[in-house]
Image (cartoon, rainbow, N blue to C red):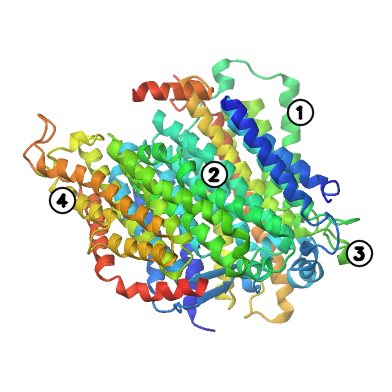
Amino acid sequence: MSGAYRHFPILMVTIPFFGAALLPFLAYLRRKAVPWASAFFLAISGGLGTFLVGKIPPGGHLSYPLGGWEPPYGIELRVDFSGYFLMMAVAGISLAAVIYSRRYIEKEVEGGRITAYYVLFLLMSASMMGFVITGDVFNLFVMMEILSISSYALVAVTGNRNAVRAAFKYLLMGAPSSIMVLLGVGLLYSVTGTLNMADLAARVGDTGYREVLIASYAILVLAFMVKAAVFPLHLWLPDAHSIAPSPISAMLSGLVVAVSAFAVARITFSVFTVHAWGLVGTTLEALAVAGAAAVLFGGIMAIYQKDFKMMIAYSTISHMGYVVLGITALNPEGITGAVYHILDHGIAKACLFMCAGNFIYRKGFRKIEQLKGAWREMPWTCFAFSLAAWSIIGLPPSAGFISKWYLVYGSVRAGKVPYAVVLLVGSILAAVYCFRVVYYMFFQPAKEGDWGERLSEAPASMSVPTWALSLATLFFGVFSYLFLDSLLKAAAQLL
Amino acid sequence: MKRLVSLLFIGALALLLLYVVSKMPPMGEPTNPTMTHVVPRYLEKSEGEAHARNVVTGVIINYRGFDTLGEVTVIYCALAAVLAVLGREKRGRIRDYVELSGIPSSVIVRTMVALVVPFIVLFSLYVILHGEMSPGGGFQGGAVIGASMIIFTTVFGLHLSSVKVPLKVRAALEGSAVITFFLVGIAGILGGGNFLAYAWPRVSQSLQPALVTWLTVLVEVGIGLGGAMVFVSILFAMVREEGADEPLA
Amino acid sequence: MNLWHNFHYAVAMVLFCVGLYAVIMRRNIIKKIIGINIMETSVFLFLISIGYRKGGVAPVHVEGLDPSRMVNPLPQSLILTGIVVAVSITALALSLAILLYRQFGTLDVNRLFREEEEEAG
């Protein structure tokens, strides 16, 4: 027995599942309790996670065979430091978003659907945690499906006609890509006879079936590109992310696409390890080109948007390009940058969407133009927005600076200077679209009747999560040294 | 033009996939990696380790139990998704198309269905409980119950079937698959093993086969019950017409 | 040349492309959903064929049966999960289709998206 803490990762994943299963009955008894209960289950999950601090060896991993079946036979959870790091990011941001949801959802979602909303929310958060720590490719597929189905439905939860259309578009691109994941897993299984990642890693090197392995890798990467909305396959993202209710936009933009990008890293480094890179080189180069295109395309499109949430959604496309470029740099710095970028982009993006939500909640404003002079009425939201935007641009001392630093450094060290230039250009584009909004908020006179003189902030249950996240971007910037060593070691372990 | 490009793309994809297929190991050979690596243990030891004569059940419930936990969560998630999209009926009765259209189905059909449905449900219990030793199991049985409710609803209308399976019952039982699975998993930890361990180390060796068998049956029943309720609720949500919740005048 | 020997796989791949064709090219939402289902079924066919063994029998232990003659049970349990996932996606897709039809009065994708452009412009 090595202590009870080794059970915690699986409990973090399954306790919200359990909670979600209890909610319908709870709603039947007492509907008002549902939001609190969901927050409670997510808090337990995150609280268990904090007990794991320092328990995961930075260069190693915590292996947990489910049901006690040793790995190739049963399913294994493989919690390495980057997985744990992302799991905690998911837990934290979900907790903020679920607290934020209570008031916001009351207003936007019709009463009978609120329970379903929270059920899906819990399933979405928990499946993301399972997704980043699982050590089994088929289990990866299962977790991804829970994640996808709940995201499709959460986009449509308002029942608004544009939302339903956006959700259907999302589903039409998402469902085939899920099937492709299953096909890729099937191809992998057919030539190796195993589904466990570590076992696969040991076996892909010396099977004779090169073509099959290349095909399965390409199919898996393509499928996860759709889920992560990497440039040519991003078509579903702007609609879905801008029309969904704001807390859901925060989760989708901040986490869902990012963990899908992380899955690419999993497949590349944990399944097709360094020994099998001869097989995957071409695909990775194509992926890097797509990532670079995404950085530029997303940034440029974001500048042209009139709708506030649409702009943030395009910015997400740009930032997924960053993550992909970090992964394809294939060195510890790049991977560290990618993982750290997933965290700080998640926090900052969630905060931006929550600010947008605050404006929508109070005023119903969606256009950037309407934000002129907003600071008079909602100064705290505007400041939170500016802080998060600071991190999105990547200026010191925010967390965005740290991750972009590592991403650029990784690209340069890999000898891919053009990509480093693309990353910097992406930051300039981000500065353009973010500062435009900040300028409107603080330095432009309000249009007649848009904003009054009286202070009217969003309710505390919405402002507090917003502010917590915007301060978190600073915290993870200033105290990044607490995590970076371990992340670098974990990344070096992968290579 | 767009059509042509898409056709070319799909054709190229098909050729690529066929090329990959031609490079795959020949199907059905006992020397394939799939036959030699992990599977022999399942085939040879499942009776002794997982205590299920049907190896598929042994793999689903025992060796890869967490996948199945995910699977029941997926179906539960589908229910929540459908309810999030279509909404759920409020407490009380639902007006339905049989009432709205005013056309009842014929006496023959009604009598037949009333006679057959109990037997279908009985058969589903057989499928659920017999899954340990023959093809079948919780999901299949749950789907059979769901099918029986579809037949019942088509003939007698949503109103009567929502009286037979009221909201209260469904709200309580929809999550039962996930809850059962989770509790069995926790019991594994309390029994001294890992999450989802069926053969608890704290229980004496001689009792373990019975324990594993009964836990398997418990999980199967939970899956069957939960699955059935999920299917019924999805059915109700889909069949329910818009604005059907208003009380009858 | 294994293509002829592996014709089960080949059929599955062709079906996969047929399904993809339906998803991309068909204008009717229900037909797109059917396309998704065809793709799913093709992958199930593929997986179940991987588990086949020449002269194999069902993997259920009965008296006097040699376990080494059984087919591979793992793909079977995988597709059982896969089928449930497929059912879930289909249920959600159909309920979205119901809602779209209620709101737009059409299932034709071109008309749905033309309206979108009009609303944006």
Q: Quadrant of residue C38?
A: top right
Q: Which residue is mark 3?
A: C65
The span from disc 2 to disc 4 (Cα, nearest Å) is 39 Å
Q: Quadrant of the N terminus of chain A?
A: bottom right
Amino acid of disc 1: Met
Q: Which mark is residue C95?
A: none
Q: Is residue A474 left or right of residue B247?
A: left
Disc 2 crowd, CA 10 A, few/some/many (<14, 14-19, 20+): many
The span from disc 1 to disc 2 (Cα, nearest Å) is 32 Å
Dot 3: element: loop
Q: Which mark is residue A380?
A: 4
Which is in the foreground here, disc 4 or disc 3?
Answer: 4
Do marks 1 and 4 share a subunit? Answer: no
* Badge 4: chain ID: A
Do marks 1 and 3 share a subunit? Answer: no
Position of residue A291 relative to residue A471, above or below, is above
Amino acid of disc 2: Ala
Q: Is residue B46 left or right of residue A352?
A: right
Do marks 2 and 4 share a subunit? Answer: no
Which is in the foreground here, disc 2 or disc 4?
Answer: 4
Disc 1 crowd, CA 10 A, few/some/many (<14, 14-19, 20+): few
Amino acid of disc 3: Leu
Disc 3 crowd, CA 10 A, few/some/many (<14, 14-19, 20+): few
Q: Which mark is residue B112?
A: 1
Do marks 1 and 2 share a subunit? Answer: yes
Position of residue A457 relative to residue A388, above or below, is above
Q: Which residue is mark 2?
A: B78
Q: Position of residue C31 (x, y in %)?
A: 62, 28
